[in-house]
């Protein structure tokens, strides 16, 4: 009897809390759909440049399942490769031809190499034991998945923890009455937001430095660019996480409801941040990427860590992160108007 | 009695359809202890929150020091203690005091002096370096009071300051109110405890968002022909 009473009470509570009910039902559906879309995505079609291809050979090749582009000189092909218009190009100056890959995404490298083997099969009638010589513009043949995922994961962890900790601590401020106490002091609303940003900014700077240091120097993650840029990117990313966390905490009544934002706000960002190749995600969903801060941070981190680029290749992403933070900050100050008008 | 420190003029407030304050007019004068007496849910907290600058009336105006609320420069001259303790329990008492003192622009020698004064007033000097988590309920209440006194406010607004405090402590807190009053501080205190109301200079009785009576405790009892404040409250409330 006592147990049934308990069961009824719990069911009543869940039904009454519409949000928890939605989390229990809708969130798994959302995450499952995303995983489905990501993993059942189309097979990646490599974009391959063909440099100076003799017509006689072209007829012998199996050129299906790739987007092809013809080039007169290797220089032009290389330019498009750096601009990421190509994944690889083949140079037919010798037999077998040599292949040059962009190289920063191991799964794309794999797709290209599989395609090259298939395409050239017919050139090698006696079983095809000849190794194709492969060069990499960035990264190398032994660059692992981790080197490619690493920068995204680094960004993700910084985002995730800062979001949660800042959100919960601001929530506590609200539920313990200290926020109200702050608002009966001469403190201005923007000062509260700024104080949080600076306090947590310092904390996340340390956090990001430790995580990045560990990943690069302990786990041996690929690091071509400057460590300073990595810190700058993670700092700006944590700023967006912080301001978003504080903003969303005003829509949560307790810690559990703060946690409920994770599958809604945090997890979907992973899918669109380049952890999975965006071109294999269904088109009707791929527009989400540019609306998530992690998308820009991951791109900038990868540019620095994998490709060794500097300021002029990352400043646009940094500006986007800054724009996100500013937007969230303004919304935060507006949200505080609920507690004090002036 | 001279100029009013607090002047509440025809204030009404509603949350959606629920009317919480109905046309309240009230004046509080310099150097008095004014008690707002009423059962919980009567609208006391809503009214004092307006005076502390947290809320605004739907109709009517609140004037403090003859200026219309809410205003940030007026907030500096008010000390407010909410019903909840609003302390950072993961910090020590001193760290809490430091933080709030800084918000009011106190620093250096002045800050140290004020901190010692207020902690002495609430008899917590010996527990300055203790974590607030280790404080008892009554100690937390007194620390909250100390914090609201840090910046020497001219007007002190206290929302149920003695809830959950034992009689001995309650007596000592009321003694500190009297000390503050003698130094010229005006005190507005809300309570639902009838015997506490008797210690106020003047009282305002609130029920269902309406001010049903105001005056000194003696006046109120006399006019209602009642022997206790509780009986007077019942008489005015039409019960």
Image (cartoon, grey):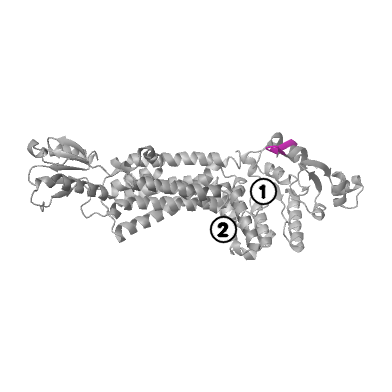
Residue B71: x and y, percent? Answer: 63, 38
Q: Which mark is residue B79?
A: 1
| Secondary structure type for disc 1 | strand
Q: In the image, is residue A239 above or below residue B95?
A: above
Q: Residue furthest right?
A: B225
Which of the two residues, B29 or A28, is positioned nearer the viewer here?
A: A28
Where residue B159 sits in the image (x, y, percent)?
71, 50
**Tag shown at residue B95:** 2
**Alpha-carbon span between mark 1 and mark 2:** 19 Å
Residue A60 x %, y %: 10, 40
* Residue A276 horizontal/vertical position (percent): 33, 47
Tell me, yes or no, if residue A309 can be seen here.
yes
Q: Quadrant of the N terminus of chain B?
A: top right
Q: Which residues are magenta?
A: B9-18
Do tags 1 and 2 sit on the same chain?
Answer: yes
Residue shown at the point (67%, 57%) measured from the top left: B141
Q: Main secondary structure of the magenta part?
A: strand
Q: Chain of mark 1?
A: B
């Amino acid at each position: 009897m006592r147990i049934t009473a308990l069961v009824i009470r719990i069911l009543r509570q869940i039904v009454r809390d519409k949000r928890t009910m939605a989390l229990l039902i809708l969130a798994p559906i959302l995450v499952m759909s995303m995983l489905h879309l990501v993993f059942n995505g189309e097979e990646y079609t490599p974009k391959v440049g063909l440099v100076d291809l003799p017509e006689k050979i072209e007829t012998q090749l199996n050129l299906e399942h790739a987007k092809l582009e013809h080039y007169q000189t290797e220089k032009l092909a290389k330019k498009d490769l750096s601009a990421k218009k190509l994944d690889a190009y083949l140079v037919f100056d010798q037999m077998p031809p040599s292949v040059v890959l962009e190289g920063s995404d191991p799964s794309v490298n794999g797709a290209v190499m599989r395609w090259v083997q298939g395409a050239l099969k017919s050139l090698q009638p006696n079983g095809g034991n000849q190794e194709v010589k492969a060069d990499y513009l960035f990264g190398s043949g032994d660059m692992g998945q981790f080197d490619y995922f690493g920068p995204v994961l680094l960004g993700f962890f910084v985002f995730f923890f800062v979001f949660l900790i800042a959100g919960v601590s601001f929530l506590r401020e609200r539920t313990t009455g200290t926020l109200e106490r702050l608002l009966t002091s001469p403190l201005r609303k923007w000062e509260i937001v700024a104080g949080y940003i600076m306090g947590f900014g310092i904390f996340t700077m340390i956090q990001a430095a430790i995580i990045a240091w560990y990943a690069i120097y302990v786990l041996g993650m690929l690091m071509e660019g400057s460590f300073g840029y990595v810190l700058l990117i993670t700092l700006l990313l944590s700023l967006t996480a912080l301001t978003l966390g504080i903003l969303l905490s005003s829509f949560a009544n307790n810690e559990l409801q703060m946690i409920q934002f994770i599958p809604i706000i945090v997890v979907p960002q992973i899918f669109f941040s380049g952890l999975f190749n965006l071109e294999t995600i269904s088109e009707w969903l791929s527009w989400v990427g540019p609306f998530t801060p992690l998308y820009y941070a991951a791109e900038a981190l990868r540019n620095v860590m994998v490709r060794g680029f500097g300021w002029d290749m990352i400043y646009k992403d940094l500006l986007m992160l800054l724009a996100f933070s500013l937007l969230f900050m303004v919304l935060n100050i507006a949200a505080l108007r609920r507690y004090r008008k002036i | 009695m001279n100029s009013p420190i607090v002047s509440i003029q025809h204030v009404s407030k509603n949350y959606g359809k629920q009317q919480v304050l109905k046309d309240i007019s009230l004046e509080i004068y310099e150097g008095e202890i004014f008690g707002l007496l009423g059962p919980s849910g009567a609208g006391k907290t809503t009214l004092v929150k307006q005076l502390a600058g947290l809320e605004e009336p739907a109709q009517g105006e609140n004037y403090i020091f003859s200026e219309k609320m809410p205003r940030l420069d007026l907030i500096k001259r008010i000390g407010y203690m909410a019903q909840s303790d609003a302390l950072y329990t993961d910090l020590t008492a001193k760290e809490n005091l430091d933080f709030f003192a800084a918000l009011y622009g106190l620093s250096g020698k002045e800050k140290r002096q004020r901190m010692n004064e207020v902690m002495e007033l609430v008899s917590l000097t010996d527990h300055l370096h203790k974590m607030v988590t280790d404080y008892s309920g009554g100690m937390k209440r007194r620390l909250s009071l100390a914090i609201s006194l840090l910046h020497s406010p001219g007007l002190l607004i206290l929302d149920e300051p003695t809830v959950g405090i034992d009689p001995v402590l309650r007596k000592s807190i009321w003694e500190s109110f009297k000390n503050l009053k003698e130094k010229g501080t005006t005190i507005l205190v809300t309570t639902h405890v009838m015997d506490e109301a008797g210690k106020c200079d003047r009282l305002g009785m609130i029920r269902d968002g309406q001010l049903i009576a105001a005056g000194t405790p003696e006046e109120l009892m006399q006019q209602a022909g009642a022997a206790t404040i509780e009986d007077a409250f019942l008489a005015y409330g039409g019960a």
